[in-house]
Amino acid sequence: MPTTSTKRKNALSVYPQTKVSKEDWLTAARDTLIGEGVEHVRILSLAQKLGVSRSSFYWYFKGRQDMLDQLLAFWRGKNTQAIVDRAMKPSDTIVRGILNLFECWTDDELFDPRLDFAIREWSRRSAEVKKVLHQCDDERVEAIFKLFRRHGYEKTDAFIRARVVYFMQVGYYAVEIDEPLERRLSYLPAYIRSFTGQDASETDVERFRRIAGRRKLRRV
């Protein structure tokens, strides 16, 4: 798979007149969206941050709305797809299925909570973004619902459990709970019991601990 630097070189070879790639523009826009809000995602201010003229922007985008549309598409492809993929990952038990899902909460490369929060803030200002956000929430809950159904849960029970799992995590991010790693991991068996009605084995908990340790877990 091409590295970020390789992608950037390839992009610049297409448009050698520019000093930055399309990926550079989108990264700057994404960082601004997260740090300052959508109202600050402006072509001129991004150009100043990148140290280029605003004219180079138009090698890659039709206009500001085109860039915003691509930002939204990136978020959907990253955060929503990560949850869907982990929920669909084969699992022998519902406990292991939920722990597969929890991997999204351990790795920002899979699921970026800051970006998710920024999109939710953006949706307060845009009916179209709010519509897409609600679609993504539904897709995520549906994927978790199907995970429970695969493991034999009755339809209504599976739906409610899926909503509890998902919206608890959304709320966790929203209130910015800050807990030490070991404390959060100590709650893992209780979370699993609450979400599934089943107890996690020591083997499953230890496996997740190892994953969390490698990825420097900040939240569960």
Image (tube, rainbow, N blue to C red):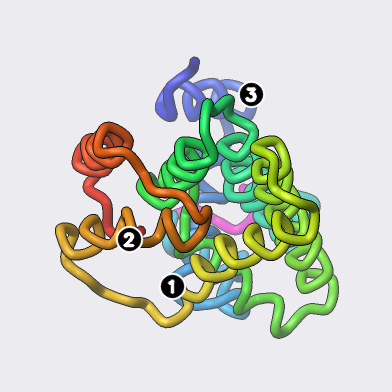
Q: CA distance from mark 1 to mark 2?
A: 8 Å
In the rendering, which numbered label is found on residue 172?
Answer: 1
Q: CA distance from mark 3 to mark 2?
A: 41 Å
Residue placed under numbered mark 2 in the picture: 219
Label 2 sits on what residue type?
A: Arg
Residue placed under numbered mark 3 in the picture: 14
Give, as a single range, the part of the protein colored magenta.
51-56
In terms of secondary structure, where does tag 2 sit?
loop
Instruction: Name the residue: 32% across, 35% down.
Output: 204
Quadrant in which the C terminus appears: bottom left
Residue 152 image position (x, y, % from top left) = 69, 40
Label 1 sits on what residue type?
A: Tyr
Label 3 sits on what residue type?
A: Val
In terms of secondary structure, where does tag 3 sit?
helix
N-term mark: 1 or 2 = 1
Extreme residue in the top direction: 1
How many tags in the picture?
A: 3
Residue 30 image position (x, y, % from top left) = 53, 58
Task: Determine contact: label 1, label 2, CB under 8 Å.
Answer: yes
Instruction: Name the residue: 23% across, 42% down.
Output: 209
